[in-house]
Image: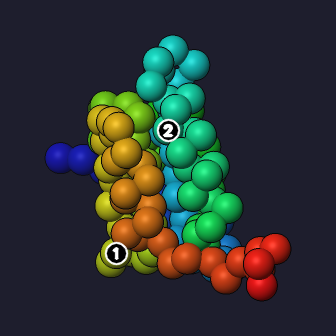
Amino acid sequence: MRMAAATDWWESELFTSPREGPVVVQFTTEVCALCPDATLKIDAVAKTHDFVWHINNAFSSTLAEELEVTALPAILVFHSVDKHKVYQKLRGDDVTRILHAECMPRFVLNADF
């Protein structure tokens, strides 16, 4: 039988701080060949959509262990305790597609406005 943690992972300040949009946690490692591309895609979406982005080392992360992250690149999109999902083994345009679906577009003034 698994022992309950003193605090649940979603009680971390990472998830309870006031914010606009969901929390996106990127799980990565130094040896992940596909992770740099995922980082670039998250960075691009961060310019147009509302979310708080954190990067977490999958090798040393208790959060990655708790969420059973086993295939990188991976992201957690956390809206609330009742609405969150871990996406793993992301390829191609997966990151962009997921973040566009999960995160609201930000109102951006551009030069044409």
Task: Identify the residue at the far front of this view.
Answer: 112
Report helix, strand or loop for mark 2.
helix
Task: Identify the residue at the far right of this view.
Answer: 111
Quadrant in the rendering for residue 105: bottom right
Q: Which is nearer the eye, 69 or 105? A: 105
- Quadrant containing the C terminus is bottom right
Position of 45 with respect to 63 (left or right) is right
Q: Position of residue 112 (x, y in %)?
A: 77, 78
Residue type at the position of mark 1: Lys
N-terminal of the pair, mark 2 or mark 1, is 2
Q: Which is nearer the eye, 85 or 59? A: 85
Quadrant in the rendering for residue 69: top left
Please name the residue that numbered disc 2 is placed on.
Answer: 38
Q: Residues within 10 Å of mark 1 (few under 14, many from 20)?
A: few
- Asked whether disc 2 touches disc 1, contact meaning CB atoms under 8 Å apart, the reply is no
Q: Position of residue 29 (x, y in %)?
A: 53, 25
Q: Which mark is residue 24?
A: none
Please name the residue that numbered disc 1 is placed on.
Answer: 83
Residue type at the position of mark 2: Ala
Q: Position of residue 70 (x, y in %)?
A: 30, 32
Residue 65 drawn above or below residue 5: above
- Residue ID at (33%, 36%): 91
Which of the two discs, 2 and 1, sits closer to the camera?
2
Q: Is residue 8 visible?
A: no
| Figure label count | 2
| C-alpha distance separating marks 2 and 1 | 22 Å
